[in-house]
Image: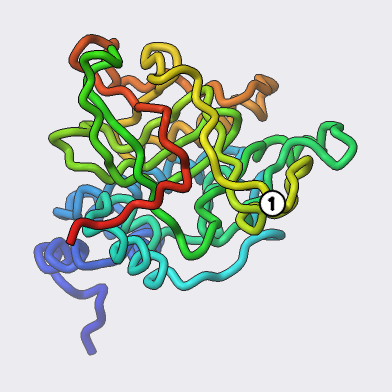
Amino acid sequence: MYTFNDLPNELLLQIFPHFPLKSLIAALGVRSLWRHLVPLAEINPARRGLLELYLQIIASPIFLQTRPWLLERLRPFDREAYIDSLLEQHNYLPEDFRIWILEWPAKAVIAGCWPGLPTTYYGLDSENKLMPRRDRLFRGCNWLGRQPPVLHAVEFSYIQNPKEANPQDVPALLVWEEYLMTWLVLGPKSLCSHGVYTVGDDEYYGDFEDRSGQEGLDEDTEPWFKPDGDYMDAEEGCTVYSSWTYWLLQRFHHLESMERGYDRMMEYPEPSESRPWGDNDEGFHSQPRADRVWKPKS
Protein backbone atom coordinates (compact mmCIF):
# COMPACT_ATOMS: atom_id res chain seq x y z
CA MET A 1 0.00 0.00 0.00
CA TYR A 2 1.30 3.42 -0.98
CA THR A 3 1.70 6.06 1.71
CA PHE A 4 2.24 9.81 1.67
CA ASN A 5 5.97 9.17 1.92
CA ASP A 6 5.88 7.33 -1.40
CA LEU A 7 4.75 10.38 -3.37
CA PRO A 8 7.29 11.67 -5.90
CA ASN A 9 9.20 14.81 -5.03
CA GLU A 10 7.54 16.76 -7.83
CA LEU A 11 4.10 16.10 -6.36
CA LEU A 12 5.23 16.97 -2.83
CA LEU A 13 6.50 20.31 -4.11
CA GLN A 14 2.99 20.96 -5.45
CA ILE A 15 1.34 19.93 -2.16
CA PHE A 16 3.47 21.82 0.37
CA PRO A 17 2.36 25.31 -0.78
CA HIS A 18 -1.18 24.42 0.34
CA PHE A 19 -0.08 23.59 3.90
CA PRO A 20 -0.89 26.08 6.68
CA LEU A 21 1.98 27.28 8.83
CA LYS A 22 1.62 24.65 11.56
CA SER A 23 1.58 21.85 8.98
CA LEU A 24 4.73 23.21 7.35
CA ILE A 25 6.42 23.26 10.74
CA ALA A 26 5.35 19.66 11.33
CA ALA A 27 6.47 18.61 7.84
CA LEU A 28 10.02 19.71 8.62
CA GLY A 29 10.17 17.07 11.33
CA VAL A 30 8.67 14.15 9.40
CA ARG A 31 11.77 13.06 7.52
CA SER A 32 14.99 14.53 6.19
CA LEU A 33 13.71 14.55 2.59
CA TRP A 34 10.74 16.74 3.54
CA ARG A 35 13.02 19.04 5.50
CA HIS A 36 14.95 19.51 2.26
CA LEU A 37 11.89 19.91 0.02
CA VAL A 38 9.82 22.38 2.07
CA PRO A 39 12.22 25.32 1.50
CA LEU A 40 12.15 24.54 -2.24
CA ALA A 41 8.36 24.71 -2.54
CA GLU A 42 6.66 27.86 -3.85
CA ILE A 43 5.12 28.82 -0.52
CA ASN A 44 3.19 32.06 0.01
CA PRO A 45 5.92 34.67 0.75
CA ALA A 46 4.18 35.89 3.92
CA ARG A 47 3.84 32.33 5.21
CA ARG A 48 7.43 31.54 4.26
CA GLY A 49 8.64 34.57 6.18
CA LEU A 50 6.76 33.44 9.29
CA LEU A 51 8.14 29.92 8.91
CA GLU A 52 11.69 31.29 8.76
CA LEU A 53 10.94 33.48 11.79
CA TYR A 54 9.69 30.46 13.74
CA LEU A 55 12.79 28.42 12.91
CA GLN A 56 15.02 31.30 13.97
CA ILE A 57 13.40 31.92 17.35
CA ILE A 58 13.19 28.27 18.43
CA ALA A 59 16.94 27.98 17.90
CA SER A 60 17.58 30.68 20.52
CA PRO A 61 18.12 29.70 24.19
CA ILE A 62 15.73 32.47 25.26
CA PHE A 63 12.85 30.66 23.56
CA LEU A 64 12.65 27.81 26.08
CA GLN A 65 13.50 30.11 28.98
CA THR A 66 10.46 32.29 28.29
CA ARG A 67 7.89 29.54 27.66
CA PRO A 68 6.85 29.02 31.33
CA TRP A 69 5.98 32.72 31.73
CA LEU A 70 3.86 32.68 28.58
CA LEU A 71 2.13 29.37 29.23
CA GLU A 72 1.00 30.59 32.66
CA ARG A 73 -0.91 33.45 31.01
CA LEU A 74 -1.93 32.04 27.64
CA ARG A 75 -5.65 31.82 26.97
CA PRO A 76 -7.58 30.65 23.91
CA PHE A 77 -9.35 33.11 21.65
CA ASP A 78 -11.37 32.89 18.44
CA ARG A 79 -8.80 33.63 15.77
CA GLU A 80 -11.22 33.90 12.87
CA ALA A 81 -13.53 36.18 14.87
CA TYR A 82 -10.55 38.42 15.66
CA ILE A 83 -9.74 38.79 11.97
CA ASP A 84 -13.41 39.25 11.07
CA SER A 85 -13.72 42.03 13.65
CA LEU A 86 -10.80 43.91 12.08
CA LEU A 87 -12.11 43.41 8.55
CA GLU A 88 -15.50 44.76 9.59
CA GLN A 89 -13.72 48.00 10.52
CA HIS A 90 -11.40 48.12 7.50
CA ASN A 91 -11.19 45.97 4.38
CA TYR A 92 -7.42 45.47 4.38
CA LEU A 93 -4.98 43.60 6.61
CA PRO A 94 -1.32 42.87 5.87
CA GLU A 95 -1.06 39.28 4.69
CA ASP A 96 1.65 38.31 7.19
CA PHE A 97 -0.39 39.73 10.09
CA ARG A 98 -3.52 37.85 8.97
CA ILE A 99 -1.62 34.55 8.63
CA TRP A 100 0.12 35.16 11.97
CA ILE A 101 -3.19 35.56 13.78
CA LEU A 102 -4.77 32.52 12.11
CA GLU A 103 -1.85 30.09 11.98
CA TRP A 104 0.97 31.00 14.38
CA PRO A 105 1.45 28.37 17.16
CA ALA A 106 0.16 29.94 20.36
CA LYS A 107 2.88 28.31 22.46
CA ALA A 108 5.50 30.03 20.30
CA VAL A 109 4.29 33.57 21.06
CA ILE A 110 7.04 36.19 20.83
CA ALA A 111 7.72 38.57 23.73
CA GLY A 112 4.21 38.66 25.19
CA CYS A 113 2.59 40.12 22.08
CA TRP A 114 -0.53 38.08 21.27
CA PRO A 115 -4.34 38.45 21.36
CA GLY A 116 -4.47 35.43 23.68
CA LEU A 117 -2.46 37.20 26.40
CA PRO A 118 -3.82 39.82 28.83
CA THR A 119 -3.32 43.56 28.47
CA THR A 120 -1.52 43.78 31.80
CA TYR A 121 1.28 46.36 31.95
CA TYR A 122 4.33 44.54 33.32
CA GLY A 123 7.27 46.38 34.81
CA LEU A 124 6.42 47.75 38.26
CA ASP A 125 4.42 46.25 41.10
CA SER A 126 1.87 48.03 43.32
CA GLU A 127 4.67 49.50 45.45
CA ASN A 128 6.45 50.88 42.37
CA LYS A 129 9.21 48.33 42.75
CA LEU A 130 10.74 46.36 39.93
CA MET A 131 9.02 43.06 39.26
CA PRO A 132 10.94 39.76 39.07
CA ARG A 133 13.36 39.54 36.17
CA ARG A 134 11.19 37.20 34.11
CA ASP A 135 8.32 39.73 34.29
CA ARG A 136 10.63 42.59 33.36
CA LEU A 137 11.60 40.74 30.19
CA PHE A 138 8.04 41.34 29.01
CA ARG A 139 7.85 44.94 30.18
CA GLY A 140 5.08 46.79 28.40
CA CYS A 141 1.39 46.53 27.60
CA ASN A 142 0.06 44.01 25.08
CA TRP A 143 -2.73 46.00 23.41
CA LEU A 144 -3.43 43.12 21.03
CA GLY A 145 -5.12 41.49 24.01
CA ARG A 146 -7.97 44.00 23.79
CA GLN A 147 -10.96 42.10 22.41
CA PRO A 148 -12.73 42.83 20.25
CA PRO A 149 -9.88 44.75 18.61
CA VAL A 150 -10.47 48.42 17.81
CA LEU A 151 -8.93 50.34 14.92
CA HIS A 152 -8.14 54.00 15.49
CA ALA A 153 -7.87 56.86 13.02
CA VAL A 154 -4.42 58.42 13.15
CA GLU A 155 -3.21 61.28 11.00
CA PHE A 156 -0.36 60.55 8.67
CA SER A 157 1.74 62.82 6.48
CA TYR A 158 4.78 62.60 4.23
CA ILE A 159 6.01 66.03 5.28
CA GLN A 160 7.25 66.87 8.77
CA ASN A 161 6.68 70.64 8.58
CA PRO A 162 3.20 71.33 10.06
CA LYS A 163 2.69 74.32 7.77
CA GLU A 164 3.26 72.26 4.64
CA ALA A 165 1.80 68.93 5.65
CA ASN A 166 -1.57 67.68 4.52
CA PRO A 167 -2.17 64.81 6.95
CA GLN A 168 -4.63 62.08 6.07
CA ASP A 169 -6.54 59.81 8.39
CA VAL A 170 -5.35 56.21 8.17
CA PRO A 171 -6.60 53.20 10.16
CA ALA A 172 -4.13 51.76 12.65
CA LEU A 173 -4.13 49.05 15.32
CA LEU A 174 -2.33 49.79 18.59
CA VAL A 175 -0.08 46.79 19.20
CA TRP A 176 2.32 47.48 22.07
CA GLU A 177 3.17 50.20 24.56
CA GLU A 178 6.42 50.47 26.49
CA TYR A 179 6.87 54.21 26.89
CA LEU A 180 6.83 54.17 23.10
CA MET A 181 3.74 53.16 21.16
CA THR A 182 3.77 50.63 18.34
CA TRP A 183 1.10 50.81 15.64
CA LEU A 184 0.27 48.44 12.81
CA VAL A 185 -0.77 50.84 10.06
CA LEU A 186 -3.40 49.60 7.61
CA GLY A 187 -3.23 52.49 5.17
CA PRO A 188 -2.45 51.98 1.48
CA LYS A 189 1.14 51.26 0.51
CA SER A 190 1.08 54.34 -1.69
CA LEU A 191 0.83 56.43 1.48
CA CYS A 192 2.47 54.26 4.16
CA SER A 193 5.31 52.30 2.60
CA HIS A 194 6.13 50.56 5.89
CA GLY A 195 3.83 48.39 7.97
CA VAL A 196 4.75 49.03 11.62
CA TYR A 197 5.62 52.33 13.32
CA THR A 198 6.99 52.84 16.81
CA VAL A 199 6.20 56.40 17.88
CA GLY A 200 7.80 58.21 20.82
CA ASP A 201 6.43 60.67 23.35
CA ASP A 202 2.80 59.54 23.08
CA GLU A 203 0.83 57.58 25.64
CA TYR A 204 -2.42 55.72 25.18
CA TYR A 205 -4.03 55.28 28.54
CA GLY A 206 -7.01 53.33 27.24
CA ASP A 207 -10.31 52.56 28.88
CA PHE A 208 -9.91 51.26 32.41
CA GLU A 209 -11.54 47.99 31.44
CA ASP A 210 -9.13 47.53 28.53
CA ARG A 211 -5.97 47.26 30.55
CA SER A 212 -5.75 44.82 33.45
CA GLY A 213 -3.36 45.11 36.36
CA GLN A 214 -2.20 48.64 35.76
CA GLU A 215 -1.32 50.93 38.64
CA GLY A 216 -2.10 54.59 39.26
CA LEU A 217 -5.03 55.03 36.88
CA ASP A 218 -8.48 56.16 37.98
CA GLU A 219 -11.53 54.23 36.84
CA ASP A 220 -12.85 57.19 34.86
CA THR A 221 -9.68 57.56 32.81
CA GLU A 222 -10.52 58.23 29.16
CA PRO A 223 -8.42 57.26 26.14
CA TRP A 224 -6.19 60.10 25.05
CA PHE A 225 -2.96 61.00 23.33
CA LYS A 226 -0.34 63.00 25.12
CA PRO A 227 1.21 64.87 22.17
CA ASP A 228 4.67 66.39 22.16
CA GLY A 229 4.01 69.34 19.87
CA ASP A 230 1.81 69.25 16.82
CA TYR A 231 3.97 66.86 14.83
CA MET A 232 6.34 64.13 15.82
CA ASP A 233 10.03 64.72 15.24
CA ALA A 234 10.29 61.81 12.84
CA GLU A 235 14.06 61.49 13.10
CA GLU A 236 13.98 61.05 16.87
CA GLY A 237 10.44 59.95 17.61
CA CYS A 238 9.50 57.39 14.97
CA THR A 239 11.03 54.06 13.95
CA VAL A 240 9.67 52.23 10.93
CA TYR A 241 9.61 48.52 10.14
CA SER A 242 9.02 47.14 6.68
CA SER A 243 6.57 44.43 7.73
CA TRP A 244 4.81 42.81 10.67
CA THR A 245 7.14 39.80 10.47
CA TYR A 246 10.20 42.03 10.60
CA TRP A 247 8.88 43.87 13.65
CA LEU A 248 8.31 40.52 15.42
CA LEU A 249 11.90 39.56 14.66
CA GLN A 250 13.15 42.81 16.20
CA ARG A 251 10.94 42.24 19.24
CA PHE A 252 12.61 38.88 19.73
CA HIS A 253 16.10 40.36 19.30
CA HIS A 254 15.15 42.95 21.92
CA LEU A 255 14.12 40.17 24.30
CA GLU A 256 17.43 38.40 23.70
CA SER A 257 19.43 41.57 24.39
CA MET A 258 17.55 42.16 27.65
CA GLU A 259 18.25 38.62 28.77
CA ARG A 260 21.93 39.19 28.07
CA GLY A 261 21.88 42.05 30.53
CA TYR A 262 21.06 45.03 28.31
CA ASP A 263 17.93 45.82 30.26
CA ARG A 264 16.89 48.98 28.45
CA MET A 265 13.48 50.28 27.57
CA MET A 266 12.47 49.70 23.96
CA GLU A 267 15.94 49.86 22.40
CA TYR A 268 15.46 47.82 19.24
CA PRO A 269 18.27 47.14 16.79
CA GLU A 270 18.16 49.70 13.99
CA PRO A 271 16.06 48.19 11.16
CA SER A 272 18.30 47.54 8.19
CA GLU A 273 15.51 48.23 5.71
CA SER A 274 14.83 51.75 6.98
CA ARG A 275 16.43 54.70 5.26
CA PRO A 276 17.47 58.12 6.66
CA TRP A 277 14.63 60.53 7.22
CA GLY A 278 14.19 63.24 4.60
CA ASP A 279 11.66 65.73 3.32
CA ASN A 280 9.69 63.05 1.50
CA ASP A 281 9.67 60.49 4.27
CA GLU A 282 6.72 59.53 6.37
CA GLY A 283 5.86 60.93 9.77
CA PHE A 284 3.02 60.49 12.21
CA HIS A 285 0.86 63.38 13.24
CA SER A 286 0.59 63.06 17.01
CA GLN A 287 -2.31 65.35 17.76
CA PRO A 288 -5.38 63.08 17.36
CA ARG A 289 -6.87 61.37 20.38
CA ALA A 290 -6.76 57.60 20.51
CA ASP A 291 -10.53 57.48 20.99
CA ARG A 292 -10.96 58.59 17.39
CA VAL A 293 -12.25 55.22 16.23
CA TRP A 294 -11.72 54.45 12.56
CA LYS A 295 -14.99 54.53 10.62
CA PRO A 296 -14.97 52.97 7.14
CA LYS A 297 -16.22 55.16 4.33
CA SER A 298 -19.64 54.13 3.07
Q: Is residue 151 visible?
A: yes
Query: Residue, x 20% and y 56% (percent of image)?
Result: 297
Q: Report crowding for label 1: few under 14, some 14 to 19, many 20 or more residues within 10 A (C-alpha).
A: few
In the picture, the quarter occupied by the N terminus is: bottom left
Query: Residue, x 46% and y 73% (percent of image)?
Result: 78
In the rendered image, the vertical position of residue 87 relative to residue 78, given as above or below: above
| Residue 187 picture location, percent across and down | 23, 42
In the rendered image, the vertical position of residue 298 relative to residue 153, given as above or below: below
Residue denoted by label 1: 220
In the picture, the quarter occupied by the C terminus is: bottom left
Say what amino acid the circle numbered 1 marks.
Asp
| Residue 73 picture location, percent across and down | 68, 59
| Residue 13 picture location, percent across and down | 15, 61
Q: Nearer the viewer, residue 205 or 176?
A: 205
Relative to 98, 77 lies left or right:
right
* Quadrant of the image occupied by residue 164: top left
Q: Nearer the viewer, residue 57 or 296?
A: 296
* Quadrant of the image occupied by residue 116: bottom right
What scheme was used to colour the molecule? rainbow
- SS class of the residue under badge 1? loop
Q: Is residue 31 visible?
A: no
Q: Nearer the viewer, residue 263 or 287?
A: 287
Query: Residue, x 54% and y 58% (percent of image)?
Result: 146
Spot the residue most to the right. 127
Relative to 158, 140 lies left or right:
right
| Residue 123 picture location, percent across and down | 73, 36
Relative to 139, 54 lies left or right:
left
Spot the residue most to the bottom. 1
Spot the residue most to the left. 10
Query: Residue, x 36% and y 27% (percent of image)?
Result: 285
In the rendered image, the vertical position of residue 219 relative to residue 232, given as above or below: below
Q: Nearer the viewer, residue 94 or 6?
A: 94
